[in-house]
């Protein structure tokens, strides 16, 4: 059981990063970013290219995955979502836009990166032992990096001026503008922060699992599951949702045949949402 | 003559509806003026146009020798205007402290001492400092909203119905506060109110609005004596 929980910790911390990214975008833009998984996949390839192809250190690749995928998010906000949101008010339009972006990014990735599965050399060697459970040291490193990133992000959102403005914008855009905040700049930055987190998560997990261009779709669906479980638009809910899905998945893979796990998870989540439609920490929508 | 703040021939349209139909008004430096009139007279629309939340359909807005209309809200705020919007619009899921600090978003120095200044003037907020602003009473929320606006160190403060939905005793406290920041710090005020009695008492000059036009204007003390105004807005 300790083994399963350790595995859950690896997956859960990284999932929390993914869920935090999608939550930031949802709460400031009211957009469900269905392209989140594809951005995660691109983050994985960025690390692969910097680490394996260019021979640079893993940490540098990770930094680049944040910056490049973050910049991609800024471009998406400025040239896709903003122009569309200015013209149409219906929410499903931005959902379709996000899905279209997902398909576009995946096809583009297939052309640029090819169809091969890519991985990076182990970031650390050795085996870590805890109460009889064993974990490759590389995975322990991943847990610590992800946890440090989550703490850094929460500190940024909670205690910096820009973080405060992001929270304000999620609550009331006009009132935020009235405090002298440039909403255009902050929206683009917030979107980039959210996608950058997807890139980081992808970059981190490429150290454990390899990445391929089709990896995004499953991650997008999982990201959506996490925020449904935790409560859409709430940061603490995103972290919780990430861990809950991580535990469910690890326990499922340990006890059930592989193909059954997500079937069972979906049934559990559907049942849960009937009882608590706003998720664990969520507030009613709207 | 060029006033410190002036609006010339302003019109505001929402789709087919014209809410403001060619209004001109002005305020001297450090003056309190008030806009009074019934619901739907266009008072809020004027303030929204001044702060750039709504783009005016026509006219000009000038402040301290600079033209404001066409500029973004953040740029207008940067030039020394602050607004307490209708319905307060505080950030409900943030602490009182974070709400007040949001007001100082563009500032770099002197924030801590100004925060102290606000808390000294509104001791109630000191007790609630770490509490979520959404859990406060209406009057306390209005104090947060006014305090937040003042944290930007404005030279001109726009107040949209500060007395709406607030207990009379708190309204008096807020009125005293508005008078004191005007007197002590020289902050000019544009006060939009349905509570005409309070508005006429606080301001030196007033404009009476009716369906998007100025129906009457004059020194507040004179308007308070005017029979039409008394009948229409002060209840006899």
Image (cartoon, coloured by chain):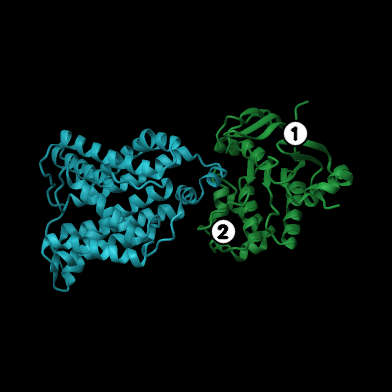
Chain colours: A cyan, B green
Q: On screen, B195 above or below A115?
A: below
Q: Which tag, 2 or 1, sits closer to the chain's start?
A: 1
Q: Nearer the viewer, residue A44 or A39?
A: A39
Residue A224 appears left or right of A169: left
**Residue designated by label 1:** B26
Q: What residue sits 37% from the left and 66% below the top?
A: A276
Quarter the N terminus of chain A occupies: bottom left
Give me the chain letter of mark 1.
B
Asked whether the viewer can see residue B114, the reply is: no
Residue B28 appears left or right of A147: right
Q: What residue sits 21% from the left and 41% below the top?
A: A46
- Give the crowd class for mark 2: few <14, some 14-19, many >=20 residues within 10 Å: many
Q: Nearer the viewer, residue A224 or B105?
A: A224
**Residue designated by label 2:** B96
Q: Residue placed farthest to the top in the image?
A: B1
Q: What residue sits 51% from the left and 57% below the top?
A: B94
Q: On screen, B87 above or below A113?
A: below
Q: Quadrant of residue B163?
A: bottom right
- Give the crowd class for mark 1: few <14, some 14-19, many >=20 residues within 10 Å: many
Q: Quadrant of residue A141?
A: bottom left
What SS does tag 1 mark? strand
Q: Nearer the viewer, residue A74 or B103?
A: A74
Residue A60 position, x and y percent, is 24, 43
Residue B28 position, x and y percent, is 77, 35
Q: Quadrant of residue A137?
A: bottom left
Residue B64 position, x and y percent, is 69, 31
Give me the chain letter of mark 2.
B
Asked whether the viewer can see residue A219, the reply is: yes
């Amino acid at each position: 059981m300790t083994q399963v929980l350790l595995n859950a910790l690896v997956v859960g911390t990284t999932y929390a990063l993914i869920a935090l990214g999608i939550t930031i975008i949802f709460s400031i833009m009211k957009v469900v970013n269905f392209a989140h998984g594809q951005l995660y996949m691109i983050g994985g390839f960025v690390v692969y290219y910097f680490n394996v192809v260019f021979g640079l250190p893993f940490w540098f690749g990770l930094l680049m995955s944040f910056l490049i995928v973050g910049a991609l998010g800024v471009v998406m906000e400025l040239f896709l979502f903003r122009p569309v949101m200015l013209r149409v008010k219906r929410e499903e339009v931005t959902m379709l836009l996000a899905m279209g972006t997902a398909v576009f990014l995946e096809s583009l990735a297939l052309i640029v990166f090819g169809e091969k599965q890519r991985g990076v050399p182990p970031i650390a060697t050795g085996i870590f032992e805890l109460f009889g459970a064993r974990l490759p040291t590389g995975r322990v490193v991943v847990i610590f990096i992800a946890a440090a990133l989550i703490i850094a992000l929460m500190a940024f959102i909670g205690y910096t001026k820009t973080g405060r403005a992001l929270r304000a914008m999620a609550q009331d855009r006009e009132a935020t503008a009235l405090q002298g905040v440039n909403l255009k700049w902050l929206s683009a930055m917030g979107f980039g922060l959210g996608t950058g987190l997807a890139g980081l998560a992808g970059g981190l997990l490429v150290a454990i699992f390899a990445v391929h261009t089709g990896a995004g779709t499953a991650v997008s669906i999982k990201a959506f599951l996490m925020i449904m479980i935790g409560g859409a638009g709430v940061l603490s809910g995103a972290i919780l949702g990430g861990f809950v899905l991580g535990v469910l998945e690890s326990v499922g893979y340990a006890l059930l045949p592989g193909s059954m796990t997500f079937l069972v998870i979906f049934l559990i989540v559907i049942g849960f949402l009937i009882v608590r439609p706003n998720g664990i920490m969520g507030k009613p929508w709207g | 003559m060029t006033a410190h703040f002036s609006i010339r021939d302003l019109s505001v349209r929402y789709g087919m509806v014209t809410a403001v139909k060619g209004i001109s008004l002005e305020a001297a430096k450090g003056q309190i003026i008030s806009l009074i009139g019934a619901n739907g007279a266009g008072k809020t629309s004027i303030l929204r146009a001044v702060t750039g939340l709504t783009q005016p359909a026509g006219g000009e807005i000038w402040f301290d020798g600079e033209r404001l209309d066409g500029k973004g809200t953040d740029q207008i705020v940067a030039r020394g205007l602050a607004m307490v919007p209708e319905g307060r619009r505080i950030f409900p899921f943030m602490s009182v402290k974070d709400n007040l600090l949001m007001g100082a978003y563009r500032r770099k120095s002197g924030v801590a001492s100004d925060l102290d200044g606000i808390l000294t003037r509104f001791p109630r907020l000191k007790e609630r400092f770490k509490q979520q602003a959404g859990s406060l009473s209406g009057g306390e929320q209005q104090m947060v909203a006014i305090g937040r606006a003042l944290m930007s160190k404005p030279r001109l403060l726009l107040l949209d119905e500060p007395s709406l939905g607030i207990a009379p005793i708190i309204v008096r406290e807020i009125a005293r506060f508005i008078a004191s920041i005007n007197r002590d710090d020289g902050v000019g005020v544009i006060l939009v109110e349905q509570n005409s009695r309070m508005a006429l008492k606080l301001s030196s000059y007033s404009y009476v609005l009716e369906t998007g036009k100025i129906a009457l204007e004059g020194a507040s003390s004179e308007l308070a004596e005017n029979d039409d105004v008394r009948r229409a807005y002060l209840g006899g």
